Amino acid sequence: MIKEKKIKVVDLFAGAGGFGLGFKLAKCNYELLLSLEVDKWAVDTLKANSNHTIIHNDIKKYNTAGKIKEICPEKPDVIIGGPPCQGFSNAGKKDPSDPRNSLFKSYAEWVEVLEPKIFVMENVKGILTGKNERGEKVIDIIRQTFEKIGYRVNIWELNAANYGVPQSRERVFIVGNKFNTDISIPPITHYFHYEKAKLNGKAQNLLEAITVIDAIGDLPELNAGEGSEEDIYTKEGSSTFQRISKGSNNILFNHVSMRHTSRVVKRYERIMDGESLFDMPEDLMVRKRNGNGELSQVLFSSNYRHLKPNMISYTIPASFYSNFIHPTQPRNITSREAARLQSFPDNYVFKGKRTQISSKLLTKLGKDSENHLSQYNQIGNAVPPLLAKAIARHLHSYLNNNFGILT
């Protein structure tokens, strides 16, 4: 009997595990050897959903070949991961001196020591234009780093919505291989409605991008402050995406709405009716935080955005708790609704607090030991599992052709 070899995978900067989960969902005989993650609550999430080896530590502690091989004695075929990228993010201040920007070097050390056949590194689009303190393009430095250790490098720009994720999320994937071949981007499976004419007939073999309501419309209605971290949920979904997300699972995790004042609820109701934030009555306008009732002049470019039912979602960022208003209910979205928009299945449970105050404030309060990634942070930081699944399936053919999966 012909038996397929296990394709061994190491997941660095694993976060809540979206990237690794996608490789599991691909069902191409991938096996996660280990996941490495520094954040305690993200590790709690990984352990609640996985049974492979999970290392809770800082990647910078493994700074020699001996230390890397000690915790990963078996060579992986694939290394995946997304080193933190805040300094290159459009949502951040684009600080080239941000120490987190150099964490790709730690990732590269693991690749050099363990010599996987393929690696995939995820990052924000800002990495394509970001420069270091000397004015050198970061993407060129990354490419050269991996080419020096023997990898052919391709740069993919992918939008998760083209792979069945109900969200417009553009990300860069740096893909290296030992086969000295160019690896093309995974073929898209979904198209945006406005692309149909441009596709010129090719759309007939594709599905239309998943809308917000098709993704979360079946989840129980909640008023502000309602919900439970764990509840029984037996309703059948009305869309294919909903049914697949629910699967055979009757437990609904992490579906808890934030508490809102009646004033905020009224503000949301008017925004849902199409009213501009700055055209509503003064008593419903946003006040400055600790500003003694003074009106805020901030334009809130990323806050108070109503998720339109029949459109795909905006990008879910790392801190989305006040960014998005539910399509039909005057409240912010829950962790579970955001997880659906990121394409996590319903049986995937997130640990830790739902929200967290800023690192700066925690330090000021002397609570650095409590500085962990909230559920919202974990979900927003994740590689969408369905996008990761498409990548995993695409890479399988290259591994099969060049590595010989069958024995």
Image: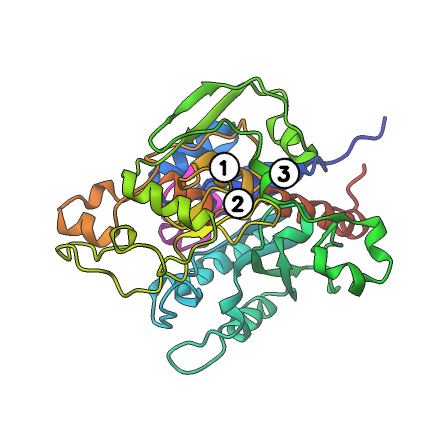
Residue 168, position in %: x, y? 58, 54
Left/right of residue 8 with respect to residue 347 in the rendered view? right
Left/right of residue 72 with respect to residue 210 in the rendered view? left
- Give how far apart the Cα atoms at labels 3 and 1 are: 12 Å
Question: How are the colours assigned in the image?
Answer: rainbow
The residue labelled by disc 2 is: 11
Front of the two marks 1 and 2: 1
- Give how far apart the Cα atoms at labels 1 and 2 are: 25 Å
As helix, strand or loop, the secondary structure at mark 3 comes to: helix
Q: Residues within 10 Å of mark 3 (few under 14, many from 20)?
A: many
The residue labelled by disc 1 is: 337
Q: Looking at the picture, which amino acid does disc 1 mark? A: Glu
Who's the residue at 78% across and 58% down the image? 196
Residue 73 visible (yes or no):
no
- Give how far apart the Cα atoms at labels 3 and 2 are: 31 Å
Reply yes or no: does residue 68 show up in magenta. yes
Q: Quadrant of the N terminus?
A: top right
Q: Looking at the picture, which amino acid does disc 2 mark? A: Asp
- Magenta span covers which residues? 54-70
Reply yes or no: does residue 236 show up in magenta. no
As helix, strand or loop, the secondary structure at mark 1 comes to: helix
Mark with earlier residue (3, 2): 2
The residue labelled by disc 3 is: 214
Q: Residues within 10 Å of mark 1 (few under 14, many from 20)?
A: many
Residue 382, position in %: x, y? 49, 46
Looking at this rendering, what residue extends furthest in the front direction? 281
To which quarter of the image does residue 236 belong? Answer: top right
Q: Quadrant of the C terminus?
A: top right
Disc assigned to residue 130: none
Along the viewing direction, whichever of 113 and 364 lies nearer the viewer? 364
